[in-house]
Image (spheres, helix red, strand yellow):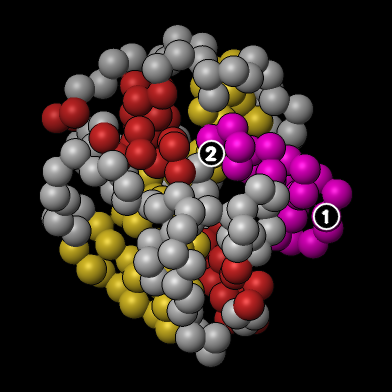
């Protein structure tokens, strides 16, 4: 599956319809610091604190991420996250790499016209109605990782159903934050917590 996602088979779904029974969930999963920074967790270049997650190694965390990826049908990511993933995963082996390489991937980008990573499709046009269409059509839930700019767009269009925040016990003081530029207050319901041996905690929130 490569190239551009065309003119959405379910076009311009209104907000009121997004919570209809049977519509799949869009789940945002992020590595964040105590002060909300999400930038360059795995070692991406160009940031002073790049690679901060590796200060807290944990087999439990790896198992959690493995189960999370394996339980979702498709991945939705922005261009920069796509480029990072596409550089790393095709050369790796094992069940997790196999899942990342084989699962459908949808890339939100205003500059890309095609995507070479296996089973990748570029969203062509306005991302909000395209994502609403995916939520209506997919057989399983849609996972969003990283992709800060994309997450901001999805949040503004009320498309995020659940946040899974893996909060690492570190304060960085600078960098892109997950909830920057909120137009208004947004209450969420805490539905789950899990703490790992590294001191990292997953907080799961849903819309009320």
Horizontal side, residue 187 vs residue 174: left or right: left
Q: Is residue 197 above or below residue 45?
A: below
Secondary element at image label 2: strand
Question: Which residue has dot 2 on it?
Answer: 77
Q: Give residue 87's position: percent from left, percent from top.
A: 77, 43
Magenta stretch bounds: 78-104
Q: Disc count in the image?
A: 2
Residue furthest out toward the bottom: 197
Instruction: Kindly report the secondary structure that dominates the magenta region of the rendered protein.
Output: helix
Judging depth in this view, the residue of 174 and 119 nearest the camera is 174
Q: For the residue carrying disc 1, how many other residues have a C-alpha within 10 Å: few (<14), some (14-19), or many (20+)? A: few
**In the rendered image, the vertical position of residue 89 relative to residue 82, given as above or below:** below
Of residue 159 and residue 80, the one placed in the foreground of this image is: 80
Q: Residue at x 20, y 53 (%)?
A: 207
x and y percentages locating residue 143 in the rendered image: 47, 48
The quadrant of the picture occupied by the C terminus is: bottom left
Crowding at mark 2 (Cα within 10 Å: few <14, some 14-19, many 20+)? many
Residue carrying label 1: 92
Residue 164 left/right relative to 190: right
Cα distance in 3D space between marks 1 and 2: 19 Å
Q: Which residue is at the front of the view, 62 or 139?
A: 62
Q: Quadrant of residue 129?
A: top left
Quarter of image, res 105: top right
In reply to whether residue 93 is colored magenta, the answer given is yes
Residue 131, percent from left and from top: 39, 29
Q: Earlier in the sequence, mark 1 or mark 2?
A: 2
Q: Residue furthest top?
A: 7
**Label 1 SS:** loop
**In this rendering, does residue 200 appear at all?**
yes
* Residue at the image point whose x is 77% and y is 49% from the top: 88
* Image-based side of 128 in relation to 56, left or right: left
């Amino acid at each position: 599956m490569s190239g551009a996602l065309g003119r959405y088979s379910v076009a311009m779904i209104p907000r009121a319809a997004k919570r209809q029974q049977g519509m799949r969930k869009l789940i945002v999963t992020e590595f964040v610091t105590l002060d909300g920074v999400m930038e360059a967790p795995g070692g991406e270049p160009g940031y002073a604190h790049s690679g901060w997650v590796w200060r807290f190694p944990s087999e439990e965390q790896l198992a959690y991420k493995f189960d999370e990826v394996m339980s979702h049908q498709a991945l939705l990511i922005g261009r920069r996250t796509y480029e990072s993933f596409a550089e790393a995963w095709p050369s790796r082996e094992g069940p997790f790499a196999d899942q990342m390489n084989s699962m459908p991937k949808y890339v939100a980008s205003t500059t890309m016209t095609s995507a070479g990573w296996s089973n990748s499709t570029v969203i062509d046009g306005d991302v909000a109605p395209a994502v609403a269409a995916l939520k209506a059509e997919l057989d399983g839930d849609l996972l969003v990782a990283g992709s800060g700019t994309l997450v901001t767009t999805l949040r503004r269009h009320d498309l995020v159903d659940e946040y899974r925040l893996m909060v690492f016990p570190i304060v960085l003081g600078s960098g892109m934050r997950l909830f920057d530029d909120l137009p208004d207050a947004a209450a969420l319901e805490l539905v789950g917590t899990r703490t790992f041996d590294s001191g990292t905690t997953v907080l799961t929130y849903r819309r009320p």
